Image: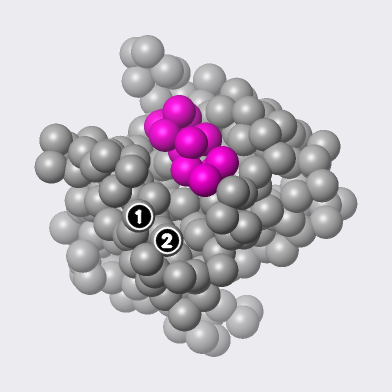
Amino acid sequence: YIRDIRGTPGGITVFFAGCNFSCPFCNVPDLVEQKSEFLVDLREVKQQISSLMGSSVLFTGGEPLLQKTALLDLLAFCKEQKLEACVHTNGSKPDVLKALLDSGFLSKVVMDVKVPLDDSSLLKSVTRAGTFFEPLEEVRQNIIKSLELLSLHEVEVNFVTLIVPGLMYKKEDFLAIASMLEQRSCVWELRAFTNGIVLEKQFQKVESPTLQFIQN
């Protein structure tokens, strides 16, 4: 299930459809579900990647790690084509992440750290994760496992946290994340929420944080 493949100034971006989170502020709401119209033959995907003539490929979503077999196939193709490969994940699938890391096909991992992982209530509010089949505590523990895995592999790592006014915006929450990451060799990027097309309409009215707020 792939929604789009784009050539960008930084390389090529492949958008996988389907996500196990339903973040209310998500700015790609059409990627939350795996729809039949998003089914694409992998041979076509590889042809498009080749035709775009980039030097690197970012696999994002949605949540690309929900499609392990297809993702591994595409990563192997990137390796054959001498393309740098990066995956952007929410960190909820550590077993798949381990398989990707062990494959040796990955050059870089971008992982969302949406909230401090000792706050289950905030995790629930931000991600809307947790189901009968995958309880919220299991999701939380899986994200922790993914963090541990990344500390064991010599792969470039970027962590991303979104500043969302009224939801994920308190200084103490960002300090708690900083404490989790401070001993790591990584980049931690704080991104500002931007309204517009989002999953839940109420967040269309939320103003983006100001530069002064972010600097503070």
Up-down relation of residue 91 to residue 108 (above or below): above
Please, what is the three-letter code of the amino acid marked with disc 2? Ser
Q: How crowded is mark 2: few (under 14 residues within 10 Å), some or many (20 or more)?
A: some
Residue 47, label in figure: 1
Q: Name the residue under label 2.
A: 50
In this rendering, position of residue 168 left or right of residue 146: left
Give the quadrant of the C terminus: bottom right
Prevailing secondary structure class for the magenta stretch in the rendered image: helix
Residues 91 and 192: in front is 91
| Residue at the right extreme, as displayed | 183
Indicate which disc residue 87 carries. none
Whether the magenta-drawn stretch holds residue 84 is answered as no
Q: Residue at x 21, y 65 (%)?
A: 197
Residue 93: percent from left, percent from top: 53, 29
- Give the residue at the far bottom of this rendering: 212
Magenta residues, as a range? 66-77
Asked whether disc 2 touches disc 1, contact meaning CB atoms under 8 Å apart, the reply is yes
Task: Look at label 1 and name its amino acid.
Answer: Gln
- Residue 55: x and y, percent? 56, 68
